[in-house]
Amino acid sequence: MPDSKKDYQKILASIQTPVEGEAGETGTWSNIKPIININKCTPAKSGKYTCFRCWLFCPEGVISRTIPPEINLKYCKGCGICMEECPVEAIRMEVMNQK
C-alpha cells in the first residue's frame, strides 16, 4: 500500500513538543530573561494571530500563542532564541534579580 503522506507531513508528525515544567522550574537557571515590548510586537500591535516566531522557535514552549504573547519566566531558561527570531526586534534580554 503506498504511503499517502507528503514528506512535510512526515516531518511535522515527528516533531516533539516541549512539556512545560518537565525538568522542574528552570527559570532560576539564568538571571537573563526575555522581555517583550508590546509596542513593537506584531500580534499585539495588529490584534491578529500573525508572526508568533517567538512561540514557534522557543525550545521550552514557555511563550503563549495569545495576544499579546506572554513568557512564563518560571520555566524560561533565558536562551535568547526568541529574541534572535523576532523579526521586529520586540524582544530584548534583561538581567533580572533572582529571588
Image (tube, rainbow, N blue to C red):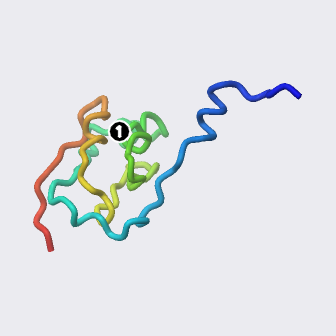
* Residue, disc 1: 45
The x, y position of residue 37, in whole percent, is: 24, 45
Considering every residue shown, the one lying at the far front of the view is: 1
- The quadrant in which the C terminus is found is bottom left
Image coordinates of residue 16 in percent, x first then y, are 53, 47
Indicate whether 86 appears above or below 33: above
Q: Which residue: 29% across, 41% down?
A: 81
Could you tell me which quadrant the N terminus lies in? Answer: top right
Query: Whole-percent x and y of residue 43?
Result: 40, 39
Residue 61, position as x, y percentages in the image: 42, 53
Q: What residue occupies the far bottom of the structure in this picture?
A: 99
3 relative position to 33: left or right? right
Does dot 1 land on a helix, a strand or a loop?
helix
Question: Which amino acid type is marked by label 1?
Answer: Lys
In-front residue for pair 3/76: 3
Q: How many marks?
A: 1
Relative height, residue 46 to residue 71 (above, below): above
Q: Of residues 52 and 49, which is closer to you in this image? A: 52
Whether residue 81 sits left or right of residue 52 in the image: it is left
Residue closest to the eye, 9 or 68: 9
* Residue name at image x 13 percent, y 51 percent: 94
Q: Quadrant of residue 55?
A: top left
Left or right of 95 on screen, residue 35: right
Quadrant in the picture for residue 70: bottom left
